[in-house]
Amino acid sequence: MDAKRGTQTVLITGATDGLGKAAALLLAENGYRVFAAGRSTEKRAQLGTLANEKRLPLETLEMDVCDDGSVQRAVTSVYQKAGAIDVLINNAGLAYVATVEDSSKPISSVSCV
């Protein structure tokens, strides 16, 4: 895994914690330009600080995948800064846990998974 031939731009949702964070750091360490998106201001700041300390090509973005406007703003920002998104890792999601019988929401209304 090496982006040396030409820097590839990666956008990762849910990138401020867990597997998303690990993927963001690994890809940045291997030369990819990473845009790490997440909701938590605190976690984005911590990841940004770590990336700066390690001098990694990683930038954090605010994004809530359940908010279309938030997604549009983040994607627009990436396009303005990088010109393209070569790789998308959609790691963020929402869990809605209930049996169908106990659910007060129709299944068709759950759109952010």
Image (cartoon, rainbow, N blue to C red):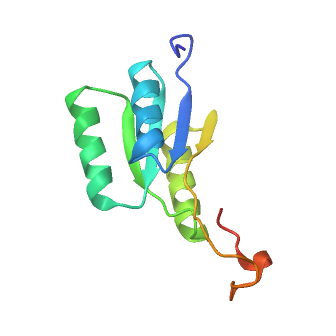
Which residue sits furthest top? 5
Tell me the quadrant of the picture where the C terminus can be found.
bottom right
Taking depth in this image into account, of 28 and 73 the one nearest to the observer is 28
Q: Residue at x 60, y 41 (%)?
A: 89
Q: Residue at x 56, y 52 (%)?
A: 75
Residue 67 percent across, percent down from the top left: 56, 70
Give above or below for 38 relative to 97: above
Give above or below for 77 relative to 101: above
Q: Is residue 67 visible?
A: yes
Q: Is residue 85 visible?
A: no
Question: How many callouts does the rendering have?
Answer: 0
Q: Residue at x 26, y 51 (%)?
A: 45
Taking depth in this image into account, of 18 and 90 the one nearest to the observer is 18
Taking depth in this image into account, of 63 and 21 the one nearest to the observer is 21
Taking depth in this image into account, of 111 and 31 the one nearest to the observer is 111
Which residue sits furthest bottom? 104
The quarter of the picture where residue 47 lies is top left
Q: Residue at x 52, y 21 (%)?
A: 7
Tell whether 53 sits left or right of 23.
Answer: left
Give above or below for 4 relative to 92: above
Residue 62 percent across, percent down from the top left: 42, 58
Tell me the quadrant of the picture where the N terminus can be found.
top right
Give above or below for 31 relative to 66: above
